[in-house]
Image: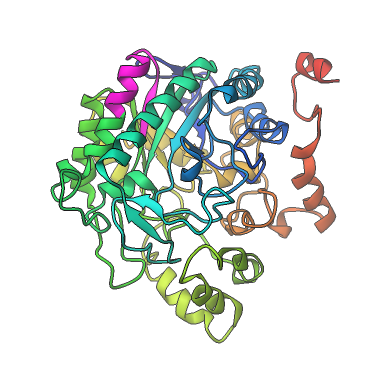
């Protein structure tokens, strides 16, 4: 195992991770309406830490309540939440696992906003509604942008005070930073719009503000979409291309970013992120929760609900997948970015085959991978690789039912073929709700929990 590159430490400027596997940002509605986190979230994160990942990138954590994508998600907008995050970090650290908190703001991409955001257009780079679901928004003023910048800096300070291991700026997948970066979304005419340098100004100001607040010795990475592919709705502008993102990555590095995390797509979910299938049977029973959030959501609901209309959405969604792989869907874009920066590069994109990841590292495509669904399917995936397996015994099928259920149900694997029965599936989903869990804990920790 010591000779396997997957299990060699990954060294950043201020942080060392024991192996090359990161749990990517994924979570559920585990927390309280005020943004305070719960024991359920701690239990969720410990599943992956116990399974052997080197580091966990938290799910989307808003720096302001109005920046939530979903109600009942933990936030980092208050000082009195610091001890709660400290408790989570201590739990994860028991497994020799690092914890990187993802600082985020929804902008116009806001799925189930909760009482703080209902019936209020979100701040964005633009006043044009989001095109897939029809989320409303308005262009932020200069004063509001300045407030957002300081909110991110304050969030990073709270993360450091909680004893966590670093922060990631979520500047990918359609959230607020993407709305400024993307030429397909940003239609401003002031100093935050127009040229690529202007569109990147907000992100760069946030990096500078964080460095001014916490110094250069605290780990900071940036997640970017290598290519926007903004034309999910066919008539939309395509947005940023790879050469644009290479420039942005170089600017981020020069301002103090310690790593670049490469993804793809100008919204989430996107046909290529996460890659894989799309279950109409699942989304037909969960998407109705979106109808009140977006002005075009009812149109989508009809496409999902009625079999005769589903081919319309299937064509729109699956036409973008043709000729592209599931595993390593953005690997070559990561390779191009890595060739132009000196900091480590992470890549996300359906990884679950050890030999494929090994080849990606040794060939210079990336330094490590961030995985979500394959780890949801097999929390012990890293341990299975360590025992010599190339694929897990029961691989993730890329059905995306975990994601499509998240609107109403607990996050977890819903692929029945991976379980002996439906009851067994539900029993596994419920394991995160134990008040004092002992599952998968090392003996010393289990004894303390008992």
Q: Which residues are magenta?
A: 207-222
Question: Total of numbered circles in the picture?
Answer: 0
Residue 120 lies, in percent from the top left, at: 46, 56
Closest to the observer, 413 or 396: 413
Residue 145 lies, in percent from the top left, at: 30, 39
- Going 65% across and 17% down the picture, which residue do you hit? 94
Question: Does 397 sit left or right of 324 as displayed?
Answer: right
Closest to the observer, 114 or 297: 114
Q: Is residue 360 above or below residue 406?
A: above
Q: Residue furthest bottom?
A: 308
Q: Residue furthest left?
A: 195
Q: Colour scheme in the image?
A: rainbow
- Going 72% across and 31% down the picture, which residue do you hit? 39
| Residue 126 part of the magenta-drawn span | no
Quarter of the image with the N terminus is top right
Closest to the observer, 384 or 129: 129
Residue 351 lies, in percent from the top left, at: 49, 44
| Residue 216 part of the magenta-drawn span | yes
- Going 59% across and 25% down the picture, which residue do you hit? 81
| Residue 80 visible (yes or no) | yes
Quarter of the image with the C terminus is top right
Q: Is residue 404 above or below residue 16?
A: below
Residue 144 lies, in percent from the top left, at: 32, 41
Q: Is residue 392 above or below residue 81?
A: below
| Residue 363 visible (yes or no) | no
Question: Residue 236's quadrant in the figure?
Answer: bottom left
């Amino acid at each position: 195992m010591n000779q396997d590159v997957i299990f060699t430490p990954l060294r950043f400027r201020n942080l060392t991770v024991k192996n090359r596997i990161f749990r990517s940002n994924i979570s559920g509605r585990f927390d309280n309406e005020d943004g305070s986190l719960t024991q359920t979230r701690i239990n969720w994160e410990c599943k992956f830490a116990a399974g052997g990942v080197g580091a966990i990138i938290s799910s989307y954590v808003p720096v302001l309540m109005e920046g939530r994508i979903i109600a009942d998600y933990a936030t980092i907008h208050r000082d009195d939440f610091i001890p709660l995050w400290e408790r989570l970090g201590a739990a994860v650290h028991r497994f020799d696992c690092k914890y990187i908190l993802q600082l985020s703001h929804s902008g116009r991409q806001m799925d189930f906003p909760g009482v703080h955001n209902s019936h209020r257009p979100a701040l964005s780079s633009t006043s044009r509604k989001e095109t897939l679901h029809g989320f409303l928004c308005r262009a932020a003023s200069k004063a509001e942008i300045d407030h957002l910048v300081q909110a991110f800096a304050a969030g990073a300070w709270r993360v450091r005070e909680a004893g966590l291991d670093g922060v990631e700026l979520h500047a990918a997948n359609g959230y607020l930073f993407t709305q400024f970066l993307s030429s397909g979304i940003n239609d401003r005419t002031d100093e935050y719009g127009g040229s690529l340098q202007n569109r990147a100004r907000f992100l760069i100001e946030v990096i500078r503000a964080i460095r001014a607040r916490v110094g250069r010795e605290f780990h900071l990475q940036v997640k970017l979409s290598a290519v926007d592919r903004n034309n999910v709705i066919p008539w939309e502008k395509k947005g940023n291309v790879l050469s644009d993102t290479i420039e942005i990555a170089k600017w981020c590095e020069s301002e103090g970013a310690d790593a670049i995390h490469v993804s793809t797509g100008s919204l989430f979910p996107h046909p290529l992120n996460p890659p894989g299938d799309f279950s109409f049977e699942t989304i037909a029973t969960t998407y109705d929760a979106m109808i009140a959030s977006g002005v075009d959501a009812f149109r989508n609901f009809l496409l999902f609900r009625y079999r005769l209309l589903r081919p319309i959405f299937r064509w729109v969604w699956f036409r973008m997948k043709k000729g592209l792989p599931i595993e390593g869907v953005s690997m070559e874009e990561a390779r191009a970015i890595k060739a132009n920066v000196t900091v480590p590069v992470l890549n996300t994109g359906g990884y679950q085959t050890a030999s494929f990841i090994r080849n990606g590292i040794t060939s210079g495509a990336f330094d490590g991978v961030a995985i979500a669904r394959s780890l949801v399917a097999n929390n012990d995936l890293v341990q299975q690789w360590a025992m010599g397996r190339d694929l897990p015994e029961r691989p993730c099928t890329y059905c995306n039912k975990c994601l499509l259920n998240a609107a109403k149900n607990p996050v977890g694997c819903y692929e029945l073929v991976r379980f002996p029965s439906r009851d067994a599936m539900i029993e596994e989903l419920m394991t995160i709700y134990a008040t004092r869990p002992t599952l998968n804990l090392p003996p010393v920790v289990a004894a303390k929990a008992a």
